[in-house]
Each structure stands twice: as C-alpha cells, then as structure tokens.
Image (spheres, rainbow, N blue to C red):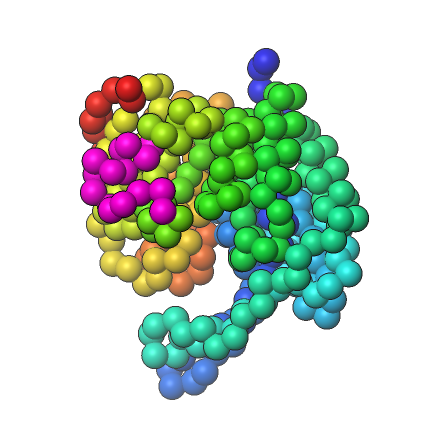
C-alpha cells in the first residue's frame, strides 16, 4: 500500500513533562521553563527540519494548565486529551555546568478511559499524516506496552509509516506488531538485558534480532561512538562528526526525528540515516534538547560516513 500524506509526522507523545531548569549566566541565576519529554524533543527537531507535526498528547492538573500552551509551538498542530491526574514534571539544576536532578514526577498511569481517547486520537491523526513516531513516557508505568503494539499494528495495516523510539516491554510490543523503523540505544539494550556487552559484534547481532523480530529497519545509537544501522538487508556503521558536547541528552531523539523528517518528505533511507545522525551530532552542542538549525544539520549531513559492514544474515 502506498504511503499517504505529505511531509507531516504524527508524534505520539502520551505523557509530556513540564521541565524547569536553573542555570547560571553572568553570575545571575536563570530559570528556564519548557515542555519536555522524548516525543516533545522529537517534535521540535522534526519541525526544525522542515516537516509539519501533529502532536498527540495528554495533559492534566495544575502542571498541565501551564504545560499545554507551551506545547503549541511553531510547526505543530496540537491535539490533546484532558487527564484526570496531573501531568509529569522535573526540576534540574545546571548552575555548575552539570545537570543535577532535584525532583521529578513522570505522571500517573493512564486510566482506561484516557487510553481509549488518546488511542483514537493518535490513530486518526497518524492515518491523516501518513507517518508516525511512537515515543515513550518518562517511566514505563505511565502507559501500558500493549497500547503501543495495537497502535503500531493498526497504523501500519492502514498505510502509515511507523517509526518507534522505545525500549523494554514497549519495544517488544511494537516489534511483535511489526513496524517500519525502530531506534534504540546501546544503553537501553544493556539495561534491558538484550545484549551482554557493547562490542560491535554484540550490537550487530542485536540489530539482526530487531530486524527478525519485526522491524524493517533498525537503528542503534552509541552516544559519541556513532551509530549502527540495518536497512535493505545490509548492516552499516554510521560515523558522525566529532563535536564539543554541551549536553548529550536528546541526541538519540534527534536522530529519530531526522530519520522521520526525511522519510516524510519522500527521501531514501540512506539520506534519512545521514540526516538523523547529523541531527543527533548537532544536538549535543546545545543545551536545548531537540533543537538545531536546518542549515547546520545539512552541512553536517555531508560529513556523516556510512560504511557497509556485512549482510544482515
């Protein structure tokens, strides 16, 4: 079935967080208040790369009243459902140059009614967009894995390209359903016991398993060591430009967003992987997660090296 829609991506970000960060500039403290969470950072990068985003999410409580207007940023069509409980949040202190977590609340688990409403919203908007990113919550307890599995299955079955950036049971659920692209990090694979070590041999074997378990394309980020990719039945090493690190968080999310933005515009997977790697590399130079300028990403894309390693057999 041909893919529907124009350069638009539905980002499923079920449980965004209100982020409060204290920084130090010119001997004065600064307070930064932003919307946060994996899907929000991905949505921000997708719009930076020229694609439109339909953001499907849920907000509630006092925190949600503050958070909702912050989610309505340029390039985003915001679609929300109300929650009975409060949205998640975190407070970080970065005055000494390093990120210190002071307090965090990922959000309460979704009720059955909330899940029904959010599922229907995401299904409809995903089919309208023709491209979807399924992003995870701040804590796996917030939303059940089976929601992701059903959503991936139904979107893919009706012509939507499905890209997931998940781990643990949520990852297993979408793999069982089958999807087009999955992105994971080597830290997540180690944490979940899916690999024994971070050697290239272990990681390439993990890519093959992700592919055989249900992902047409599998991407594996390795922080500043570059990435590995499996597409078109071939495994590749993805070399990224070395840049000074301001904040490593969010690089993998930017990679996912870069891949989605290129595919939504009809680009080939090779160019999508290059752009995703460049977006992730640029992200580490900035304190703002999921941020970056399109021209800088384009320049870095030319410096990403994709080297074939072996057939995915």
Horizontal side of residue 92 vs 234, given as left or right: right
Part of the protein shown in magenta: 193-207
Residue 149 visible at all: yes
Rendered-image quadrant of the C terminus: top left
Residue 304, horizontal then vertical, whole percent? 26, 37
Residue 8 lies in quadrant: top right
Residue found at the far top of this picture: 1
Residue 46 visible at all: no
Q: Is residue 203 magenta?
A: yes
Looking at the image, residue 70 lies above or below residue 38: below
Q: Is residue 5 magenta?
A: no
Q: Residue at x 79, y 48 (%)?
A: 113
Q: Nearer the viewer, residue 184 or 213?
A: 213
Looking at the image, residue 39 lies above or below residue 274: below
Q: Nearer the viewer, residue 83 or 249?
A: 83
Residue 306 lies in quadrant: top left
Looking at the image, residue 207 lies above or below residue 104: above
Q: Residue at x 53, y 34 (%)?
A: 174
Q: Residue at x 24, y 46 (%)?
A: 197
Horizontal side of residue 15 vs 207, given as left or right: right
């Amino acid at each position: 079935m041909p893919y529907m829609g124009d350069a638009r991506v539905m980002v499923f970000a079920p449980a965004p967080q209100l982020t409060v960060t204290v920084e130090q500039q010119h001997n004065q403290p600064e307070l930064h208040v932003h919307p946060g969470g994996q899907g929000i950072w991905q949505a921000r990068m997708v719009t930076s790369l020229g694609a439109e985003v339909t953001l499907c999410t849920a907000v509630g409580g006092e925190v949600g009243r503050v958070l909702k207007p912050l989610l309505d940023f340029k390039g985003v069509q915001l679609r929300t459902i109300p929650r009975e409980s409060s949205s998640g949040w975190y407070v970080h202190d970065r005055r000494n140059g390093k990120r210190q977590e002071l307090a965090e609340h990922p959000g309460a688990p979704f009720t059955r009614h909330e899940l029904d409403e959010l599922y229907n919203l995401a299904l409809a908007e995903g089919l309208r967009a023709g491209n979807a990113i399924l992003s995870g919550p701040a804590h796996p307890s917030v939303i059940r894995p089976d929601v992701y599995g059903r959503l991936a299955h139904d979107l893919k079955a009706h012509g939507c390209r499905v890209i997931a950036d998940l781990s643990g049971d949520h990852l297993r659920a979408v793999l069982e359903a089958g999807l087009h692209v999955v992105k994971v990090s080597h830290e997540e694979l180690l944490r979940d016991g899916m690999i024994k070590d971070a050697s290239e041999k272990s990681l390439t074997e993990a890519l093959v398993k992700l592919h055989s378990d249900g992902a047409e394309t599998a991407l594996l980020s390795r922080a500043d060591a570059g990435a590995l990719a499996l597409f078109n039945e071939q495994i590749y090493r993805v070399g990224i430009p070395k840049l000074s690190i301001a904040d490593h968080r969010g690089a993998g999310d930017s990679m996912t967003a870069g891949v989605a933005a290129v595919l939504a515009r009809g680009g080939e997977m090779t160019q999508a992987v290059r752009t995703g790697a460049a977006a992730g590399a640029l992200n580490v130079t900035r304190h703002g997660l999921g941020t970056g300028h399109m021209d800088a990403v384009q320049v870095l894309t030319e410096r990403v090296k994709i080297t074939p390693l072996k057939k995915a057999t």
